Amino acid sequence: MTEDRLYSKDHEWILPLGENLVRIGITEYAVKQLGDVVYVEVPEVDAEVSVGGEIGTVESIKSASEIFSPVTGIIIAVNEELEDGPELVNASPFDEGWFAEIQLENPIELQGLLTDEQYKTYIAELAAEEEA
């Protein structure tokens, strides 16, 4: 994990880029749960998204999982590299494996997301529940 990001409980990361712009992707934890990613469906540019709304799909050899928007706004860019190279999500979930960039409609929503420390605590709790 990286400290310059925020996190959702759905295992998306959010990187503030300035000017009310964020980049989103999925965390290493999510990638490990999925296994080898074989297909990624990214959202359409100019699509309006809202918190909790589905914005894409990741398919792996194990399962398929929806990607949910952690913020409200408009998609202004998508990572087209994922169409031909879905394995980028496995190889580099925090860098080359990003999904979309969103122009925030309501920047205050970022305050409801988890910090790096809070997310680490959250996934530790999940791991403990799985072991119990």
Image: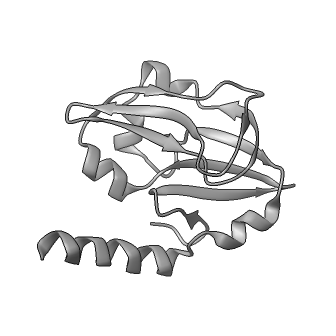
Give me the residue at 21% from left, 74% from top: 129
**In the image, residue 132 lies at what x, y percent?**
12, 77
Residue 57: quarter of image: top left
Residue 7: quarter of image: bottom right
Residue sitting farthest toward the top: 84
- Quadrant of the snapshot with the N terminus: bottom left
**In the image, residue 34 lies at what x, y percent?**
27, 44
Q: Is residue 26 above or below residue 87?
A: below
**In the image, residue 24 lies at what x, y percent?**
60, 48
Q: Is residue 64 above or below residue 13?
A: above
Q: Nearer the viewer, residue 120 or 97?
A: 120
**In the image, residue 90 lies at what x, y percent?**
34, 42
Give me the residue at 34% from left, 58% from top: 29
Q: Nearer the viewer, residue 28 or 122?
A: 122
Residue sitting farthest toward the left: 132
Residue 27: quarter of image: bottom left
Q: Is residue 108 above or below residue 72?
A: below
Q: Quick check: 46 left or right of 26?
A: right
Q: Quick check: 59 left or right of 12?
A: left
Give me the residue at 65% from left, 48% from top: 23
Q: Is residue 107 above or below residue 69?
A: below
Give me the residue at 69% from left, 41% from top: 101
